[in-house]
Image (cartoon, rainbow, N blue to C red):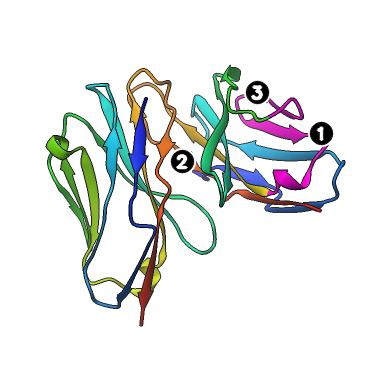
Amino acid sequence: AQKVTQAQTEISVVEKEDVTLDCVYETRDTTYYLFWYKQPPSGELVFLIRRNSFDEQNEISGRYSWNFQKSTSSFNFTITASQVVDSAVYFCALSEDGSARQLTFGSGTQLTVLP
Amino acid sequence: DAGVIQSPRHEVTEMGQEVTLRCKPISGHDYLFWYRQTMMRGLELLIYFNNNVPIDDSGMPEDRFSAKMPNASFSTLKIQPSEPRDSAVYFCASSLVPGQETQYFGPGTRLLVL
């Protein structure tokens, strides 16, 4: 069975600090997809990134970067020079090939960026 | 193109009443998903459709919950009768197939059952 663990329930940083959100997953499939979603205080779920299991290249998008390591089953998310607007709950999710697109979500990490 | 549209955004009702939540997926998306989010259980998949056909409803909590997708651009999630424990945020999401796994979520419906 697939499982996603976000061990950090809450993180608080001061603006301009870097912060890394951890995500560890479990799956028996060799083909799978990993996602990060952001849920700001307004409540919507915003898609951030999708990564398939065959692509282990790290990705950078502005202040956001993702580190995918199959050897440790981790897909960590780093925000560089955090801003107050980054305050949100961040969810990591997993979809297995053949699972008919069912997403398994982690429990989320509440990030608070203080001014 | 507009994203996933949900209505109403907020719903307050009394126990025992019927509640209907509505969703319009992104045009061209073949899959539609209904999720429920609560503090205790996080994000749970309730049901999903492929080409308007329900594929897996194993996440639907009880017979009080039902979902339909009469056409490619509209789906409903109905709770009858509603109970206080149904209070949650209900999200609708849609995705393309094949090859694209990304689910795009609507803004959610915040349901409060008194």
Task: Count neighbours of disc 2 (C-alpha within 10 A) and say few if under 14, some if 14 to 19, many if 20 or more.
Answer: many
* Disc on res. B71: 3
Chain letter of disc 3 in the image: B
Residue A67 drawn at (x, y percent): 17, 48
Q: Quadrant of residue A85?
A: bottom left
Residue matched to label 2: B104
Above/below status of A114 relative to A110: below
Taking the image as drawn, is residue B5 in sight?
A: yes
Marks 1 and 2: same chain? yes
Q: Check disc 1 and report its element: helix, strand or loop.
A: loop
Chain letter of disc 2 in the image: B
Type of amino acid under label 1: Gln
Between disc 3 and disc 1, whose residue precedes? 3
Residue B46 drawn at (x, y percent): 59, 31
Q: CA distance from mark 3 to mark 1?
A: 22 Å
Q: Residue furthest bottom?
A: A115
Q: Residue at x 34, y 49 (%)?
A: A6
Type of amino acid under label 3: Asn
Comparing marks 3 and 1, which lies closer to the viewer?
Answer: 1
Q: Is residue A20 left or right of residue A2?
A: left
The residues colored magenta run B62-87
Residue A43 drawn at (x, y percent): 54, 57
Q: Check disc 2 and report its element: helix, strand or loop.
A: strand
Taking the image as drawn, is residue A94 in sight?
A: no
Chain letter of disc 1 in the image: B
Q: CA distance from mark 1 to mark 2?
A: 27 Å
